Image: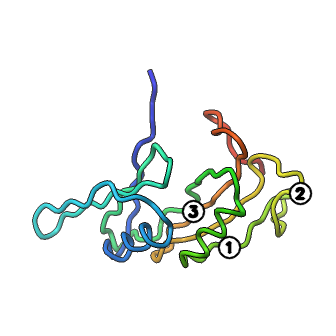
Amino acid sequence: MDWKLELVVLPVADVDRAKAFYLEQAGFDLLVDHREGETFRVVQVTPPGSACSVALMANPGAAGSVQGLHLVVDNVDAAHDDLASRGAGPSEVFHFDAGTQVPGPDPERRDYNSFLSFADPDGNAWLVQEVRGSSAPAGESAPG
């Protein structure tokens, strides 16, 4: 039996502000913007090429509490340039050497060792990780 992660809920203070960030600055695609009554709204967005979506749900008390979500790209430098050009405020690219964060991509461009980070307006934090070529095998994660 396959168990597929298809949706992650991100608590946000302002759904419209978060929606604008994820569509315009992070470059995600809009799947759903649905309201039921005055108090319920779900906005579902998806990173390009991802099978897993993100639901932006109003929860001001928990806004910004999600940390360490990972996106995988085949070129972390291009991802940095794309996010920067959209105004998403990405960090500079970095890697790890002997357990220490070091500026710049991994000198050997090893998979799972070049990163950048960015956060939405509420502080929900993402890491973008370089895996060149193909998709990551199930269960494989970053070193360190």
Q: Residue reaching furthest top? A: 1
- Distance from disc 3 to disc 2, alpha carbons, whole Å, reads 23 Å
Nearer to me, 126 or 81: 81
Look at mark 3 in the image and give the residue it sits on: 126
Quadrant in the picture for the N terminus = top left
Alpha-carbon neighbours of circle 1 within 10 Å: few (<14), some, or many (≥20)? some
Considering the numbered disc 2 on the image, is that residue within a helix, a strand or a loop?
loop
Q: Check whether the beta carbons of the residues at disc 2 and disc 1 lie within 8 A of each other.
A: no
State the image quarter where residue 102 is shown: bottom right
- Distance from disc 1 to disc 3, alpha carbons, whole Å, reads 11 Å
Which amino acid is tagged 3? Trp
In the image, residue 70 sits, relative to residue 124, either above or below, namely above
Residue 128's x, y, as percent?
Answer: 63, 58
Residue 61's x, y, as percent?
Answer: 36, 72
Q: Is residue 52 left or right of residue 16?
A: right
Alpha-carbon neighbours of circle 3 within 10 Å: few (<14), some, or many (≥20)? some
Nearer to me, 62 or 127: 127
Look at mark 1 in the image and give the residue it sits on: 91
Q: Is residue 94 left or right of residue 1?
A: right
Look at mark 2 in the image and give the residue it sits on: 107
Which amino acid is tagged 2? Pro
